[in-house]
Amino acid sequence: MKKETKTIENITITIERKNIKNMYMRILPPNGEVKVSAPLFLSDNEINNFIKSKKDWILKKQKYIQENNIKAPLKYDNGEKHNVWGKEYELCLIKNDSVKHVLIDEEKSMIYLPVPKRSTIEKRKKILDEFYRQEMKKAIPPVLDKCTKIVGRTPSEVKIRKMKNWGNCRYHDKRITLNLNLAKKDPICLEYVMIHELCHLIEFNHGKKFKKLMDKFCPNWKEIKKRLNE
Ligand SMILES: [Zn+2]
């Protein structure tokens, strides 16, 4: 396999020569990097002409990636950045069967993830998600205690789940469900979502009454909500 980088029409392109039949082009997030896989028999000229003919399409794709802040898909690999309670850490895989717990080094901002010697992205994601679940389990009781005192309502139980919304409250059985990903956000966000869901034990919908309750129990909720959805 031969790899080279060149600039055609002001676009930087990485070309990989492979034993394939057709030419492929990909525009990759987050920077709109252009990667071309070309058959071995194709001449440089043919590749150049192909890029030139696709220029408008490439620029359009790059603009879309940039404007929509499209991120590269996570690989859960060494050096990747992951957040825990609003702080960014660099991921470091420990391929070691004796270490079982995720370790955090606050000083170096590193998160050490114990993984099997050979692991898939899905497996590593699962291990990290389990760590987030444990973090949520530790964080919830004191926050629940504080927030029930503020709001004056108590849920029947609090569950943790991967879900679309940050939280959910079932009025009929008073069960609160919290999004697992809250463990990635600043701790104040967990408190805000907890108060929000507890307020649903007083007021079902998000109308004027509800907002008044939020203003009373969590005066800067609008600012926290913004931070949560960043
Ligand atoms: Zn709500």
Image (cartoon, rainbow, N blue to C red):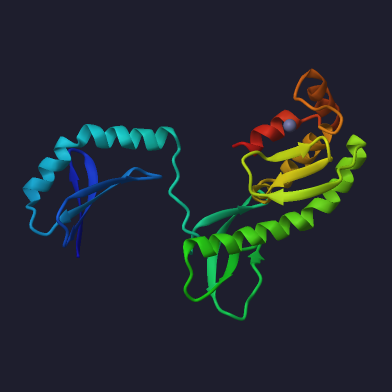
Counting from the top left corner in percent of width and height, residue 195 is at 81, 37
Residue shown at 40% from the left, 36% from the top: 66
Q: Quadrant of the N terminus?
A: bottom left
- Left or right of 172 on screen, residue 63: left
**Residue 220 found in image quarter:** top right
Position of residue 123 relative to residue 174, above or below, is below
Q: Nearer the viewer, residue 47 or 178?
A: 178
Position of residue 99 relative to residue 13, above or below, is below
- Left or right of 79 on screen, residue 32: left
- Left or right of 130 on screen, residue 70: left
- Visible residue check, residue 37: yes
Which residue extends farthest bottom?
A: 98
Please tell me in which quarter of the rendered image ligand 1 is found.
Answer: top right
Q: Nearer the viewer, residue 169 or 198?
A: 169
Position of residue 107 relative to residue 62, above or below, is below
Residue shown at 16% from the left, 62% from the top: 19
Q: Quadrant of the C terminus?
A: top right
Which residue extends farthest front?
A: 172
Counting from the top left corner in percent of width and height, residue 25 is at 24, 47
Counting from the top left corner in percent of width and height, residue 52 is at 15, 38
